[in-house]
Image (cartoon, rainbow, N blue to C red):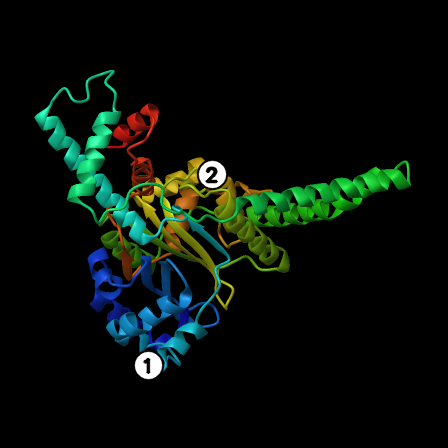
């Protein structure tokens, strides 16, 4: 949700958010008792070329919007009343309507632990802690309990019996985990492929050269797009190639100093990033198409904790503001340096495809090549466009994406009838 702020009141808004504080614990005072809430943030989006600024409220939650909105109105708005009062047209008498008026659809969304609710993640964490403690207790009584070659199933059964007796509130076993229907996605891809093959075969049946004519007609728009893109990239590269990496301005250094005080306060971090797309219909269309592709991959392909080859992202969201700027939110594990290093080393093509359509991004070729590979320019560009995340909340700041999936796997395997190999895997997770 993005709410307009009159530029003269931006300083007042920043002061109101500073009163809340910047740590995860500070964020918990605003968001901590909302049901099903994974992550949340309040961020000041500075004014763009048209002079508009915003307050962005971003939440990642389980369930339907309506009950979540009720909780935002009942709890978050009163706690951050001074901040919302800075928003133009925000009615404290009708906060629900004001929030809905500022709602923007995400152009792309990624969830690193699809199908796992906050309740399940927190349950799994406690299951792992409890079982680890019980195992330590059992080993203390019998140091040879896990001798090499021993059958792990009796140990597993004993631990699960104790868990059920001593911690009956914890759930074990394979709980429902709804995922987006990847089968439907693959069916659509096959449908498109079969349609193209049918066109080619129909052309071949109608004329000896018909198949080649159909192929040429299908490829002509792609070739035209590639030529137009190549010319645009050549112009962009010429503008940037001979420019030295620009030093940070005083305002940018002040902002980065503030960000440095916030980052690495917990095993997780938040990134808020704002850039302006390159002008022209070609770049606008490509940006929306690539974001659509990222959204589809996030829903149907990268469903088990890794966006491309990056295994540290809990949630990521791209939003296009009314003035055309691209706003990116990410909740990730580890340091900023390691996160950006993952972009460079493991997923530079896919994410370069998004940001190659924005201003001052390192030069690219064919949309997805180059770009983030120019590591120094890419990191300076990212820092230059990074915003301060003034208020941030995580429901499980001590857990990495890998932790979440490992604990879920442990819980799923926690059944007394597990086979020997699965019991050994189960013990390995402890």
Residue at the extreme right: 207
Task: Say which mark, if any, is on residue 29.
Answer: none
Count of numbered marks: 2
- Residue 140 percent location from the top left of the image: 9, 27
Q: Is residue 388 visible?
A: no
Mark 1 falls on what kind of element? loop
Q: Position of residue 194 (x, y in %)?
A: 71, 41
- Say which quadrant the N terminus sits in: bottom left
> Who is closer to the viewer here, 131 or 68?
131
* Residue at mark 1 to residue at mark 2: CA–CA distance: 47 Å
Q: Residue at x 36, y 45 (%)?
A: 175
Q: Residue at x 8, y 26 (%)?
A: 141
413 vs 270: above or below = above
Label 2: few (<14), some (14–19) or many (≥20) C-alpha neighbours in 10 Å: many
Q: Which residue is mark 2?
A: 373
Image-quadrant location for residue 48? bottom left
Left or right: residue 213 versus residue 253 is right
Q: Which of the 4 quarters of the picture holds residue 127?
A: top left
Q: Which quadrant of the figure contains the C terminus? A: top left
What SS does tag 2 mark? helix
Q: Is residue 33 left or right of residue 401?
A: left
Say if 143 sits above or below 31 in the image: above
In the visual, does 256 lie left or right of 132? right
Where is residue 107 drawn, in percent x and y? 51, 58
Question: In this orientation, which residue lies closer to the viewer: 29 or 304?
Answer: 304
Q: Please, which residue is most extreme toward the top here?
A: 149
Residue bearing the label numbered 1: 92
């Amino acid at each position: 949700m993005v709410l307009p702020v009159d530029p003269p009141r931006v300083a007042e808004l920043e002061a109101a958010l500073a009163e809340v504080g910047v740590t995860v614990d500070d964020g918990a005072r605003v968001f901590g008792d909302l049901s099903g809430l994974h992550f949340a943030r309040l961020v000041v989006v500075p004014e763009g070329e048209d002079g508009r600024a915003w307050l962005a409220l971003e939440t990642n939650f389980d369930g339907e919007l309506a009950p979540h909105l009720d909780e935002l109105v009942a709890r978050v708005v009163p706690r951050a009343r001074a901040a919302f009062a800075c928003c133009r047209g925000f009615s404290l008498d009708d906060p629900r309507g004001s929030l809905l008026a500022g709602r923007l659809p995400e152009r792309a969304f990624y969830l690193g632990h699809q199908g796992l609710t906050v309740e399940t993640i927190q349950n799994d964490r406690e299951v792992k802690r409890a079982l680890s403690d019980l195992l330590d207790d059992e080993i203390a009584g019998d140091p040879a309990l896990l001798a090499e070659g021993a059958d792990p199933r009796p140990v597993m059964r004993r631990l699960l019996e104790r868990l059920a007796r001593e911690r009956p509130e914890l759930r074990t076993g394979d709980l429902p985990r709804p995922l987006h229907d990847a089968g439907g996605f693959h069916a659509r891809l096959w449908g498109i492929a079969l349609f193209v093959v049918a066109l080619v075969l129909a052309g071949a049946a109608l004329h000896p050269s018909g198949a080649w004519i159909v192929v040429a007609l299908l490829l002509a728009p792609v070739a035209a797009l590639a030529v137009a893109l190549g010319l645009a990239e050549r112009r962009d590269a010429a503008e940037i190639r001979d420019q030295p990496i620009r030093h940070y301005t005083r305002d940018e250094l002040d902002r980065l100093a503030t960000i440095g005080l916030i980052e690495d306060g917990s095993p997780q971090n938040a990134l808020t990033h704002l850039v302006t797309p390159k002008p022209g219909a070609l770049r606008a269309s490509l940006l929306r198409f690539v974001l659509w592709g990222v959204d589809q991959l996030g829903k149907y392909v990268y469903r088990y904790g890794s966006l491309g080859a990056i295994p540290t992202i809990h949630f990521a969201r791209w939003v296009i503001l009314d003035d055309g700027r691209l706003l990116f939110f990410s909740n990730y594990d580890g340091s900023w340096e390691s996160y950006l290093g993952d972009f460079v080393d493991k997923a530079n093509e896919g994410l370069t495809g998004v940001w190659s359509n924005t201003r001052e991004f390192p030069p690219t070729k064919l949309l997805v090549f180059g770009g983030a590979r120019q590591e120094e320019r890419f990191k300076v560009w990212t820092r230059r466009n990074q915003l301060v995340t003034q208020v941030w909340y995580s429901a499980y700041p001590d857990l990495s994406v890998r932790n979440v999936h490992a604990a879920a796997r442990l819980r799923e395997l926690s059944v007394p009838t597990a086979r020997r190999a699965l019991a050994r895997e189960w013990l390995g997770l402890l």
